[in-house]
Amino acid sequence: MTAFPCTRCGACCRNIGKLLATPVVGPQLEAVMAFPHAVLADGSCSKLGPDGCTVYEDRPLLCNIDAMHARYFAELTRTEFHNLNIAACRQLIREQRLPMSWAPRFV
Ligand code: SF4
Ligand code: SF4
């Protein structure tokens, strides 16, 4: 099975404060509530380093798109779920004015 094509651009990690503050309902709330890391004043995750996530292999459920799919979104195909998330990644990359070459491509 193909893993989510994360480029480790860090755009979601810089936006984690906003994401955690967005009201969610249903099972996703579990993943939001379980997010274990501190959020810095600028809204970024304290585990974000200069080269991306410093705990990537042990990242929380909320940050693991394939694990989120298996747990909460199994009614969607993996491709459908990947593309929904890729659209969100691309939006964040645009908003943060990062190079679009860092954006994952639709599958
Ligand atoms: S915004 Fe998308 S591509 Fe960038 S680090 Fe987050 S999940 Fe990966
Ligand atoms: S734990 Fe890692 S992947 Fe998750 S928001 Fe923090 S830096 Fe990003």
Image: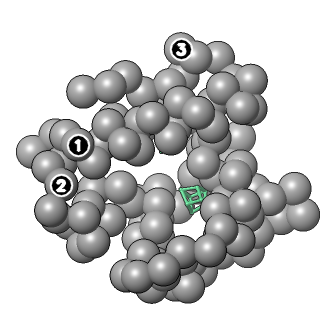
| Secondary structure under the numbered disc 2 in the rendered image | loop
Of marks 1 and 3, the one in the foreground = 1
> Does residue 85 appear in the picture of this structure?
yes
The disc label shown at residue 80, or none: 1
Q: How is the image coloured?
A: one colour
Question: Contact, CB < 8 Å: mark 2 with mark 1?
Answer: yes
Q: Residue 29 at x, y = what percent?
A: 48, 81
Q: What crowding class fits label 2: few (fewer than 14 Cα within 10 Å), some (14-19), or many (20 or more)?
A: few
Amino acid type of the residue tagged 1 in the rendering? Glu
Q: Secondary structure at mark 3?
A: helix
**Disc with the residue nearer the chain's start (2 vs 3):** 2
Q: Cα distance, mark 2 to mark 3?
A: 27 Å
Q: Which image quarter: residue 2?
A: top left
Q: Which residue is mark 3?
A: 101
The answer to whether residue 98 is left or right of residue 79 is: right
The front one of 51 and 60 is: 60
**Mark 3: which amino acid?**
Ser
At a point 87% along the width and 56% down the height, the residue shown is 42
Q: Gap in Å between the C-alphas at discs 1 and 3?
A: 22 Å
Residue hosting label 2: 76
Residue at the spot x=37%, y=22% of the render?
105
The kind of secondary structure element at disc 1 is helix
Dot placed on the residue nearer the N-terminal end, 1 or 3: 1
Residue shown at 37% from the left, 82% from the top: 27
Disc 1 + disc 3, Cβ < 8 Å: no
Task: Say which amino acid is labelled 2.
Answer: Leu
Residue 45: in sight, yes or no? no
Q: Residue at x 53, y 14 (%)?
A: 101
Looking at the image, residue 45 lies above or below residue 98: below
Q: Position of residue 100 (x, y in %)?
A: 58, 17
Q: Position of residue 33 (x, y in %)?
A: 55, 85
> Of the numbered discs in the image, which one, if any, rests on residue 68?
none
